[in-house]
Amino acid sequence: MTDGQSAASPVPSEDAEQVGPAWVKSERQLRREAELRGRARRSVSVATASTIVVAAILVVGITSSPGWPRVQETFFSPAAFVEALPDVLRGILLNIKIFLIAEVFILVLGLLVALVRGLRAPVFFPLRVLAVLYTDVFRGIPTILLLYLVGFGVPALQLQGAPGDPVTLGIIALVLSYGAYVAEVFRAGIESVHPSQRAAARSLALSHGQAMRYVVLPQAVRRVIPPLLNDFVALQKESALVSVLGPLEAVRQAQIHVASSFNYTPYLVAALLFIALTVPMARFTDHLAARVERRQTGGGTA
């Protein structure tokens, strides 16, 4: 068989007159598939062996170090792990609560700021300036400093009706900080939509607001979902910074146990719980990013 011939050959069957010839794979195609399967098995074997070797080297290198017995006692104490787990687990629930509440307000604030920055009418110039100042200032302040400024500054003003709960103040600080980043993500998504989409919408007698709502925003939101999820993965971790204001979240609970036992295993408990939260979302983000890429390259649908 030559390269120009088909990879499969028709084989007549008893019911050829009714159902047509049955097609079977050619010997060349079968050999090619067998070669690909063998290559895949070899790749998996090499990857597994190299992973085991690297893991073994790391384990031997760490456990054979002079300070390993002390580190094992201080950071990997089973008794301290079991003792701290209930309190740290209760604290991680507060972290989840902070994250979920802050996420909603961050999305709303970020989208509003992005839309304001897209207004071009001269009358909206002051709003555009405020939006630019907001994104520049709050992206430039480290989140932990913003937590101190909001958490201790707002109560010091003694304003009537101002919140005094440290959890609420921590959520406000996280919203102000991450809202600036999310606003830029939304703005990038909006600007990535081709101007012809807006022109087509306006040619159908849609107003600017209707064009944004029905044409531009749906496309922009689909494009920015992966980077938004990356920001929220970071937000999950940085919810631990609220501990500087005193709420008994996971890190604060771990600090209390460490202070009472002088054993750092509770920090390991908190770290493992945060990993259990962030890794699934990180993998979900990668999955969505891969779907978007396949859609853009014509390899599938999202």
Image (cartoon, rainbow, N blue to C red):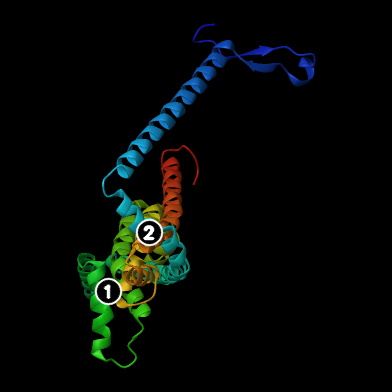
Nearest to the observer: residue 168 or residue 247: 247
- Report the residue at 35% width, 51% height from top: 196
Nearest to the observer: residue 165 or residue 62: 62
Rendered location of residue 139, percent (x, y): 23, 65
Q: Is residue 154 above or below residue 193?
A: below
Q: Could you say whether the residue bearing mark 2 is in a helix, strand or loop?
A: helix
Q: Is residue 194 above or below residue 156?
A: above
Can residue 220 be seen by looking at this rendering? no
Q: Is residue 62 left or right of residue 1?
A: left
- Closer to the chain start, of discs 1 and 2, is 1
Rendered location of residue 233, percent (x, y): 38, 58
Q: Could you say whether the residue bearing mark 1 is in a helix, strand or loop?
A: helix
Rendered location of residue 10, percent (x, y): 66, 13
Q: Amino acid at mark 2?
A: Leu
**Residue with the most extreme bottom position:** 160
Nearest to the observer: residue 73 or residue 201: 73
| Residue at mark 2 | 268
Q: Residues within 10 Å of mark 2 (few under 14, many from 20)?
A: some
| Residue at mark 1 | 147
Q: Is residue 171 left or right of residue 124?
A: right
Rendered location of residue 252, percent (x, y): 35, 71
Q: Amino acid at mark 1?
A: Leu
